[in-house]
Image: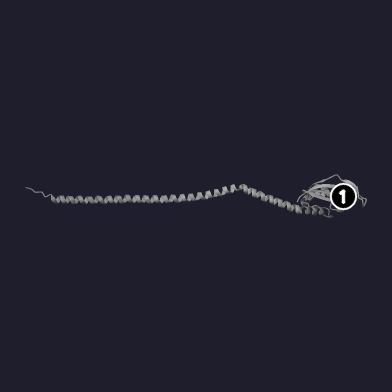
Amino acid sequence: MIRVNLLPQKRDAKRGGGGLGLSVGAGGQAWLLVVAGVVVLEIVGLILLHKSKQDELDRISHKNQEIQSKITEIQKQISDHTNIKAQLKELKDREDAIAKLQAARTGPTSTMIELSRVLTAGRGPTVDRDKLEQLKHENPGAVPNMNWDPRRLWLKEYKEEDRTVDLTGLARDGEDVSEFLRRLTLSDFFYDVKLRPASKTIDSVTHLELVGFELSAKVRY
């Protein structure tokens, strides 16, 4: 009769089976660690990406704020454009008024000084030298006669209103009146010189025949 002892074999089988269970459990833990590492890396990547996008958004928002600030400033300037134009016009009107007052104060004096030059022997009207030289070649008859004696003509009345001058006077003859008219026409201070019809008269003191004249002109100053 043969006996078979199966007890040790069962224990060995149990031991073998227990070793296999431990091996499978270690592999599962390693796999979980790998998966967890990948998840952590993805989370870190997402955090870095989010931060990068947030920084970019902050930069764009800051740039938009600067642009909006400039737009607001421009809109403010545009809204004040009418007021600025009104202020500039007011300043310009003031400057013009001051200039007119200054000209009115000094202008007549300048005109009288110019008349003194015109009626001074050896002198003549204020005129551009190049213009005078050109006139000598093109129309010598329009050039003042530097040998003319201004004592042959004298003024009796001088009136100025709104920069229009009226002159009356006496001269020895018509050529003296023509010379005076020629000088005023060339002067930088007078323009639009017009001679009214002249008339002859007898001086009550010298009993000489004289030419009475009247003329008008515009003055610049």
Residue drawn at x 64%, y 48% as measured from the top left: 86
What is the three-letter code of the residue carrying label 1? Leu
Residue 76: in sight, yes or no? yes
At which x and y percent is residue 8? 14, 51
Find disc 1 in the rendering and name its residue. Answer: 170
Mark count: 1
Task: From the viewer's perspective, tell me whether residue 106 is left or right of residue 205.
Answer: left
Depth check: 148 or 107 in front?
A: 107
Residue drawn at x 46%, y 49% as measured from the top left: 57
**CA neighbours of label 1 inside 10 A, class few (<14), some (14 to 19), many (20+):** many
Residue drawn at x 68%, y 50% as measured from the top left: 92
Depth check: 173 or 72 in front?
A: 72
At which x and y percent is residue 163? 77, 49
Q: Residue furthest top?
A: 197
Depth check: 62 or 85 in front?
A: 85
At which x and y percent is residue 21? 22, 50
Task: From the viewer's perspective, tell me whether residue 58 is left or right of residue 194.
Answer: left
Asked which secondary structure carries label 1, the reply is strand
Task: From the viewer's perspective, tell me whether residue 60 is left or right of residue 182.
Answer: left
At which x and y percent is residue 106? 76, 54
Task: From the viewer's perspective, tell me whether residue 166 is left or right of residue 48.
Answer: right
Residue 136: in sight, yes or no? no
Q: Residue furthest left?
A: 1
